[in-house]
Image: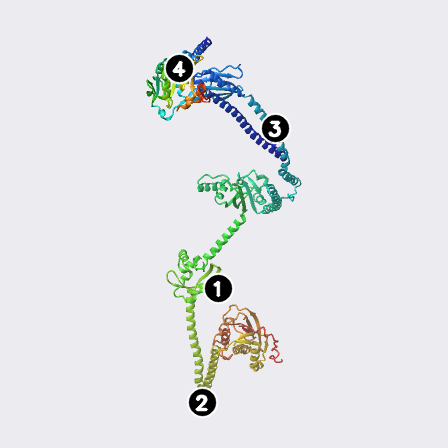
Amino acid sequence: VNITHRVSIKNKLVGIICLVTLAALGIGFTVVILSDIATYEDDLVNNTLVNARLVGNGCITALAFDDRQGAMDNLLTLESVDDVEDAYLFDKNGDLFAHYQRTPSDTPPTKEEFRLDKASEFANGRLEVTQPIRFKGQDYGYIQLRASTAQLQEKIRDYLATVLTLMAALMVLAFLLAQGLQRIISAPILHLARVTHSISKGGDYSVRVSDRRGDEIGILYGGFNEMLDQIEARRNERDAALEELAQTHAQLKSILRAASRVAIIACDENGRVSLFNSGAEQMLGYEPDEVMGSQTPLLWHLDEELAARAEALSQEFDQPIKGMDVFVAKPRLKGYEEREWTYVRKNGARFPVTATVTLVRDDARNTTGLLFVAIDITDRKRAEEEVRQSEQKYRAYISNSPFGVFVVNSMGQFIESNEALLRYCGYTEEELHRLNAPQLFSPNSPEVAKAHFGQLMTEGRSSGEVLVQKKDGSDGFYMVDAVRLSADRCLGFVADITSHKRDQEELKKFAARLERSNRELEDFASVASHDLQEPLRKVRAFGDRLKAVCGDGIPEKANDYLDRMQSAADRMQTLISDLLTFSRVTTKAQPHTAVDLNEVTVEVLSDLEIRVEELEARISIGQLPIVHADPLQMRQLLQNLIGNALKFHRSGVAPVVKVYTKAMYEPPIPHAAWTPEHQMCTFCVEDNGIGFEEKYADRIFTVFQRLHGRSEYDGTGVGLAVCQKIVERHFGKIAAESTVGKGSAFSVTLPQSSEQKGKDHERHQLEANHHPAG
Amino acid sequence: MQHEVIIKVWSIAAICLLVATSGRSDGIEKHDAETVKAVFIERLCNFVEWPEEANLSDTSWPFVIGIMGRSPATSAIRRIYGSRPILGHPVEVRRIKTTSGIGGCHLLFIAENEKSRLADIIAAVSEEPVLTVSDTPGFCDWGVLLNFRIFNNKVGFEINERAVLDSPLSFSHHLLKTATIVEPVGDNK
């Protein structure tokens, strides 16, 4: 440290002031002294020169006319001049002409010593002045005066003594003034120094110096206070920032520690690992100590993968890339690179990762390292594989689907389509994907069908038949069900219903034909029945009249014939009436309503009361359902069934008839006429009569089919046919089971009324009423 | 050996110098007084101012020396100024027989044998810018401006201050200082 730095500011100021004063006085006085000495010398020189000239001029004519006495007289005038000691007069040839010496001991200068080149010269403590003597441009000679400098030197000595005394006095004054005045500067600075010292010792930055001054010290104080303010503020900021930093650090540390599923690895510029988080430990199986500072990420990369990558990058960049540059080459261009790699655990196990390599740069954009963030994507890979397989599977489903499947965007353009769809419309996939769904609609297509696409877009769902023009120009019917998946994607399923449609058309035509033919038949039956009754009535009437007119006159044989004829006519009457009944099942149908079969059964039994009593039949009626049916036809159905049960009884055995509900179940085939709440119910009419062979179970429901001869059981064979027709009209089913000699059971299935549950009133046992005592 | 040579050379040089110096110191004594007077004439002219009408402003014009009478000095003048200029002018020496021939002369040397006509001559040139010079004792008292005399075996001169004052010529005080003054102006005669 320079010594000046150790001296106190007070002493420095005093020193500086004294030094400046000394320098100023020194220089000033030196200049003055020198100039004064020069002046003194000049004065001496000038005086001497003037004397030389004066005396010289006086000698002109002495020289001109060789007047040595005159010259000497002139030189002697110098006696009055104290300074001049010697005077020498030379003629123009340089020869001594005359001389004067105050002290005669001096030897006059010789011709050689005589010098003309200098007008004046101080030499040997004397002043030599030489002057030429001229008159009117003519040289007459030279005069040389030698003056003593003793007086001059004495004068200078006195002068110097005075000046130095003055200077010493001034220096003392300057020192005293500096001592007093330095406080103006040093006091505030020393104050500042003391405050600074106390602050640096005590660390109390709240101290301030009073700064009510207008000068630079005031500015310094202000600046100092401001600096203290800033230091205080900075210290507070710094403390806050340090705290925040510590928090951030802790947070980052905990984040790094918590990131156990992600390997975060940082490297310095040489590729040495400088950070190895817990995720990396878990993923790679190395301890941080094993790799930090000693290993590079190349350790857990697969050599062949690195080599392949290096080769690819070398080609891409057209320069050899190897080692760590494999990771750095790409990030240098865009800052980072995300890539899949295979990592090798410490134990040799390999697994796929996605590693993001980022260049770490300092503020000056210099690369200071690399950051690897790697995620184990084994699960993702597996999931992807599963997704891929699943996708493949579903794709196979869709592409192999017998139905057309397509995906269109909001413009109706085809995005995806399967083989079935291409087969339907005849286009290739490329052709189809250039088309719009609405473009496929046939010009023959009804406007309604064309609106399907719009409906799909607005309502998100559309279903219906469309008429499509195939590539070959022909039209095809398709059932399309489409649903909007997203704003720009709709999925549709297409079924080719062209042939179905054709079949349906034909079926419709056939049904119409059948309907017409049925109606004709029914009309025919009705008409025939009515029209046949008239001639029959005539046959019977004229038969009666023949009997009444001829009476006893008719031979036995003829009477027998007549009886037979009338009997036949009666039978025909019954046949016609039954046929009429049969045809009326369809022609005279009434609207369906809720029919309580219990009530109907009671009515039927009251109609059959006489017959029941005759046969001593026992009739048991269980709880029967309420069905949705034509009430009159229900009555006819039960009447026929119960009537048949009574009719085909075994002789000598009292008939036992059971009417009961067998089961209730959901309709196996829903039909348009039914409402979904309609259940089906089955009831049975069972007897212990003669029964029939099972193989005739179907035949018995055919019109005019009889299993027994007319002699055994009367009837036309229409009853069960009517039953079947009624049941079928109600979309029900009738079936018969029987064992010969044991009895038969007819089960009827009909739609149940929705009011069934509401009618939960108590059912009375009819068994007692219809079962005569004994 | 060499040292001796140097000493010898210096000795010879010193002797030569002494001889030369001694020769110069008594130069006037060596020359005859007439030649000194003739030489002094040229030196005198340096301390004399001629008026305008003397036509000495142009150096191509001759400086005319008139000589009246005959003496050894006149022949010295003739000898010396045959080639030597005065004040830069070529010198023309005229013999003046009568006072009427004085016109046009700048300097007039009056020999001793003209003593009889001296008053006339003085009267003739007193108003003219002519420096009258003589070498005869007593001539100066007659009105000749400058008269050579031998003092202490040396050529000196005397000057008639009154005549100088009356003449159109003006004399340098230096000249007056060296000369012996005849008829000083301060005296009232």
Q: Nearer the viewer, mark 2 or mark 4?
A: 4
Residue bearing mark 1? A459
Label 1 sits on a secondary structure element that is helix
Tell me which chain the residue with mark 4 is part of.
B
Q: Chain of mark 1?
A: A
The picture quadrant where one finds residue A509 is bottom left
In contact (CB < 8 Å): disc 3 and disc 4: no
The reply to whether residue A307 is in sight is yes
Residue extending furthest front?
B189
Marks 4 and 2: in contact by CB < 8 Å?
Answer: no
Foreground: disc 1 or disc 4? 4
Instruction: Look at mark 2 in the image and give the residue it sits on.
Output: A546
Whole-Å distance between the Cαs marked 3 and 2?
Answer: 204 Å
Query: Going 47% across and 55% down the picture, which residue do you hit?
Result: A395
Query: In the rendering, at what x and y percent does residue A170 appear?
Result: 61, 31
Q: CA distance from mark 3 to mark 4?
A: 73 Å
Q: Earlier in the sequence, mark 1 or mark 2?
A: 1
Q: Are marks 2 and 4 on the same chain?
A: no
Question: What's the CA distance linking mark 1 and mark 4?
Answer: 170 Å
The Cα–Cα distance between marks 1 and 2, rounded to whole angstroms, is 83 Å
